[in-house]
Image: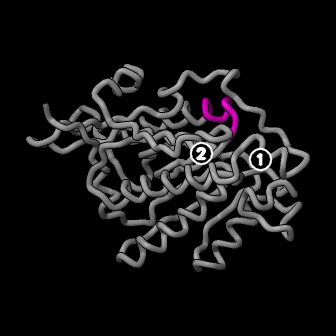
Amino acid sequence: MKKLIHFVPQYFLNPIHPIKVSLIGAGGNGSQMLSALARINHALIEMGGLGLNVTIYDPDTVESTNVGRQLFTVGEIGMNKAECLVSRFNRMYGTAWRAYPSKYKMNDSPNIIITCVDNIETRKEIGKYFRKKNLTAKHFNKNKGNYSYGYNEHYLFYWLDLGNAQKTGQAVLGANRIPQPESEKYETIEYLPCATEQFRLNKSMERDSGPSCSMAEALSKQDLFVNSVLVQTAGSMLWSLLTDVAIDTRGFYINLDTYRTAPIPIKQEDLQLIPKTIQNK
């Protein structure tokens, strides 16, 4: 049996613009992820690439309980989280990334969406938006009388979703249609299931994400290092996506009680998770 893999889009191998990333959420996972993206961007440029163009969204302000567990300082209490982080990393790396102190703008056009949110409804909204953007590459060719696809700097290729409980977490990478090259050695897959297709999301899964009154109460909801362990592993997966020709893993689970990480391998059954209405478009 041939090994099943997913080839990354040709555009990623030779982009004509910095790859556009929309980061949604600037809290425990989001603040750590922006740090990882800054390192990835710097490394890509040092390797001769164009790097990343990141926009981060979060309407929340820094609270005292965020200091220490998230990447904020005492002097930033009361300021918007997204604006604090972007300002800091722009100074550190000389980037010109943008921040919006608001919820995600659905008229954005990134190549990759990364969600670091703690509620189900936002994931559902992003899931609908993500699969809707799958159709943006489809254009009717009047001369040939059929549809053709343009996978370029305007196409939304991937959605990476991160989520965690107190000592466990997961990352799931979903992909819109990405044409795969013919291969005698491998079996290829052009779609990857996203988080809203991987899991049955419902209100019972949603954890209490309200404000904590103290650092001790905050740590009773999330372990001190669960965010950093989750994001460092997800950052490594994202680095592979941007620098390798193909991937064979589309996510992972972590457990800090057992100190184990379990990959989510790409399988043929993944296509069964994706609605036929999407695949047939």
- Whether 54 is drawn above or below 142: the answer is below
Residue 217, how many percent across, how many down?
84, 44
Q: Which mark is residue 123?
A: none
Stretch in magenta = 118-125
The residue indicated by pointer 2 is 115
Q: CA distance from mark 2 to mark 1?
A: 22 Å
- Using the rendered image of the protein, determine whether residue 102 is visible from the camera's viewpoint: yes
Residue at left 48%, top 74%?
Answer: 42
- Whether 176 is drawn above or below 67: the answer is above
* 121 in the magenta segment: yes
Three-letter amino acid code at the position of disc 2: Thr
The residue indicated by pointer 1 is 219
Name the outermost residue toward the front: 258
Picture quadrant where residue 126 is located: top right
Residue 53, how many percent across, how many down?
53, 64
Q: Is residue 214 left or right of residue 198?
A: right
Three-letter amino acid code at the position of disc 1: Leu
Picture quadrant where residue 127 is located: top right
Secondary structure mainly formed by the magenta segment = helix
Which-is-in-front pick, marks 2 and 1? 1
* 238 in the magenta segment: no
Residue 200, how many percent across, how many down?
55, 21
74 or 62, nearer to the observer: 74
